[in-house]
Image (tube, rainbow, N blue to C red):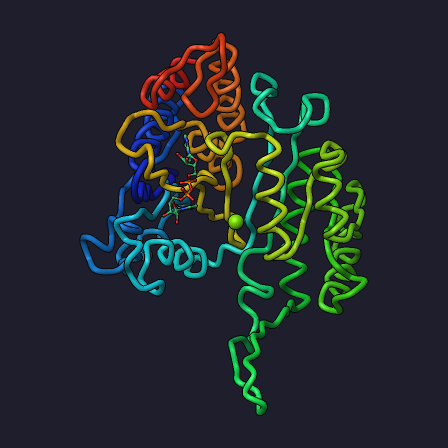
Amino acid sequence: MTKKVLLLPGDGIGIEIVAEAVKVLQALRNDYGLAVETETALVGGAAIDATGGPLPEETLQLAREADAVLLGAVGGPKWEPLDISIRPEKGLLGLRAGLGLFANLRPALLYPQLASASTLRPEVVAGLDIMIVRELTGGIYFGQPRGIRTLENGERQGFNTLVYSESEVERIGRAAFDIAMKRNKRVCSVDKANVLECTELWREVMIRVAKDYPEVELSHMYVDNAAMQLVRAPKQFDVMVTTNMFGDILSDEASMLTGSIGMLPSASLDADGKGMYEPIHGSAPDIAGQGVANPLATILSVAMMLRYSLGEEALAARIERAVSRVLDQGLRTADIHTEGTTRVGTARMGDAVVAA
Ligand code: NAI
Ligand code: MG
């Protein structure tokens, strides 16, 4: 059955990098019979310009009907004067909420060819391959009540609420264990159970979920220690699962261990395996339109899409091998360029992956 992929290039370099990802999809369709059809829609600043809002109803509807969504990036200085409630980034949040994408997968994988890109010593990060699974639709980012109130003495007080129900913890736990089964079968659940009751419950539920995955080893770590361990000895981790806020912080920390924002993909999944896939970087207005952006994070996002939403593990691995081969050939976009390698632009990098 033909699968539907919705393309949302968005703004800035989003347009250039999604074009390269489409070349790769096209090649898989022509050479390996991948049965996908694509459609393109507006999101972010491009949607604001055309329709007045960052997430047109038509886009959300197409996203709901698709098996997977590939997003470039949204935002840019052009839309920064706008009210925060109608900014391009709202389009992303609307998609995540509208599609129920509760599991955010952020791999931090260091290609050995790029070991010198990390700020950490090569022996600390060489071979690094972590998957951070962040809960994306609950926790303190969504908890009620929230706001800023004025107390009787006239002092103002800000407050947010950290809440997780058992079912929310269970489903993100299962997502993490399912992923661990396809990897090295170790899950580290990160919480603050010594201080926050909410995450005491989190820990309890994780232990319960683990009973259904006897092959997977579960460990627990407090978030402050996890932040430290990530820079001390990051290779001790396989899959890390954590709350929305802890995951926001730890996934950015982990991604930078690899030193290259242009290399890292991400996935956000719902309960049925439908997902939205995107590079972790933004629209890079400083280099947009110049044909120099690194398309590999977006191309690797296509690999994640094939693995997690389209049931095409072999083709996912094929893309990842092709990326590795292109790096072996010494081809580098400006963001990962070092002495002795060949500097190429966005389109040449995409073509090289297709050829590989
Ligand atoms: P950014 O990720 O767009 O850029 C940070 C730096 O990394 C820039 O110097 C940029 O040139 C470079 N860079 C990013 N991606 C690259 C690539 N593929 N190849 C080569 N170099 C790359 O983050 P920034 O500058 O903070 O945000 C720019 C805009 O993007 C803002 O409007 C922001 O709100 C938006 N944004 C959107 C995201 C999304 O759509 N998911 C995520 C982060 C930011
Ligand atoms: Mg973040």
Q: How many marks?
A: 0
* Residue 180, placed above or below residue 356: below
Residue at 51% x, 76% y: name it: 147
In the rendered image, residue 275, in percent from the top left (x then y), is placed at 47, 47
In the rendered image, residue 270, in percent from the top left (x then y), is placed at 51, 53
* Residue 23, placed above or below residue 206: above
| Quadrant of the image occupied by residue 144 | bottom right
| Quadrant of the image occupied by residue 18 | top left
Say whether residue 68 is left or right of residue 23.
right
Which residue is the extreme one toward the bottom?
Answer: 152
Between residues 224 and 272, which one lies in front from this camera angle? 224
Which residue is the extreme one toward the left?
Answer: 50
Residue at 40% x, 53% y: name it: 92
For the N terminus, which image quadrant?
top left
* Residue 21, placed above or below residue 200: above
Say whether residue 103 is left or right of residue 128.
left
Residue at 70% x, 46% y: name it: 227
| Quadrant of the image occupied by residue 200 | bottom right
Between residues 111 and 269, which one lies in front from this camera angle? 111
In the rendered image, residue 269, in percent from the top left (x then y), is placed at 51, 49
Between residues 73 and 166, which one lies in front from this camera angle? 73
Residue at 65% x, 67% y: name it: 164
In the rendered image, residue 111, in percent from the top left (x then y), is placed at 58, 22
For the C terminus, which image quadrant?
top left
